[in-house]
Image (tube, rainbow, N blue to C red):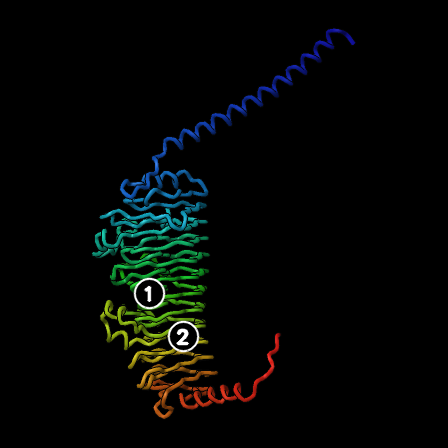
Amino acid sequence: MKISEIRGQISDKLVKISGQKMKRIFYIALLFFYFTAQLAAKEKLPKLVGDGIADDTQAIQAMLDSRETLVYLPVPAKHYVISKSLRIHSNQTLKLDAATVIRLADKANDYMLTNENLDEGDKNIVISGGIWDGNNVGVDHANGDRKGVHPRDFFIGSLFLLMNVENLRVEKLTVKDPEKFGVHIAACHKFTVDDIVFDYNAKEYNMDGVHLQGGCSEGRVTNIKGNTYDDMIALNADDGEYWEVTKGAITDIQIDGVWATDCFRAVRFLSTGTPIKRISISNIYGSYFCNVIAFTHWRFDLTDLPRFEDISIHNLFSAKVTDKELLGKLKREGERKAFSIIGIEGQLFFNNLTISNVFRTEWMPDAAPTIQIQQGTVIETLLLQGIRQTNMTDKPLTFMTNDASILNFFIDGVVIREKNVEQAITITGEGRILHKHGEITVQGEKELNEEIERAKEDIRTNPRKRHIL
């Protein structure tokens, strides 16, 4: 091989090596400038203060606008203050520690948090942790006519307003003193609301906890604790002009676990013609001022016969409020005695309604029935199963008042206990029952006490060996 050819090959190799090094240097420089720019951008973000005085709205919003998938608010020196609504984006998680407080400023008159695209919609949003203080006493109460006004431009009093979100999770947080609704969810799909504590101190009307509005589907609401001044959970397919931000069917919702001691209702349904379908409610505890479960059209005009399809209510451990201190705050004795544990207004339609495992021990004299169905309602199939009503007062307690039409009525394992069997009141009302299967069992206190004494005597006189299983 000639020397010139060897030199040429060496030269070509050097050029290739040099080119590779240049590429590496270029990419390293590019990464350096990218990360430098990112750090510079972060340095330019407004600083979080968290002293309970300074306005942290811009700082928190800038963190959200960075589009980071996880935005974490560090524990503040005191608490964060915001003066306008925060807007969370798609594919974003906003996380606070359990004890971190974020508070709405005085006279702010705005939502604490909404998703960015209320109309077009967002996806994959998580709001986790913190104590969200709506500062009810510090804001101007929402009022006026909101007809024709976009909910973003008109504060209707909700603490969170989340609309048209797919894959939404709200979890592990406390909602404190909102103006009206706590967690307001409208037309959202595939959502979970879990482990929420409601800490409501100001007593105002329409202070719901979780308020699901028209168009919601495939949702799960679980582990709801505390007290609200209205409904712990509301499912409103239709609503009044003031509140109705979305309208539409509510379908495929599971509610599991509600604990309360001082609120109007655990769960309230509202429809003036739009269907509510495939709803499961289970594990409801506590005492309630009005109903535990209510199906209503309220005071609004009907556009069609409201349809409630495939509704299941299971495991209710509830009674009416009797605590004197609480009653002193409420001062509405008539309503407390008028509203049944499960109340169904007139002019509604149910294809299948199952009510099972309801346990009521009532201490309030002249209390309303356990189940009350008003005139004009039609129920195709009603199943009552495994229900026990125990009346601890000296006045008879009606189990059920029916003024509706029931085509198929199935009764299985329903027992009511009265001190005087002869005074027991099972079913009253002027409604029609076309096909009835089963009967309500009436049990007296004397009969039960006699059986208990026999069991005690058996223990004394016939001791048995203890077996470890």
Q: Amino acid at mark 1?
A: Asp
- Given residues 283 and 126, the one toward you in this image is 283
Determine crowd level at label 2: few under 14, some 14-19, many 20+ residues with C-alpha closer than 10 A. Answer: many
Rendered position, 258 above or below 338: above
**Rendered location of residue 374, percent (x, y):** 32, 79
Rendered position, 114 above or below 424: above
Judge from the rendering whether residue 93 lies leftward or rightward of residue 13; answer left or right. Answer: left
**Rendered location of residue 170, percent (x, y):** 41, 54
**Rendered location of residue 56, percent (x, y):** 31, 41
Judge from the rendering whether residue 443 lies leftward or rightward of residue 200; answer left or right. Answer: right
Quadrant of the drawing holding the C terminus: bottom right
Q: Is residue 26 visible from the viewing direction of this image?
A: yes
Q: Amino acid at mark 2?
A: Phe
The furthest residue to the top: 3
Question: Residue at the location (64% across, 15% down)?
Answer: 15
Task: Find numbered disc 1 in the image and state the secondary structure of the residue it sits on.
Answer: strand
Q: CA distance from mark 2 to mark 1?
A: 22 Å
Rendered position, 235 above or below 162: below
**Label 1 sits on residue:** 231
**Counting residues from the N terminus, which is met first, the one under dot 2 or under dot 1?**
1
Q: Is residue 271 visible from the viewing direction of this image?
A: no
Determine crowd level at label 1: few under 14, some 14-19, many 20+ residues with C-alpha closer than 10 A. Answer: many
**Rendered location of residue 38, percent (x, y):** 44, 31
* Mark count: 2
Judge from the rendering whether residue 314 lies leftward or rightward of residue 403; answer left or right. Answer: right
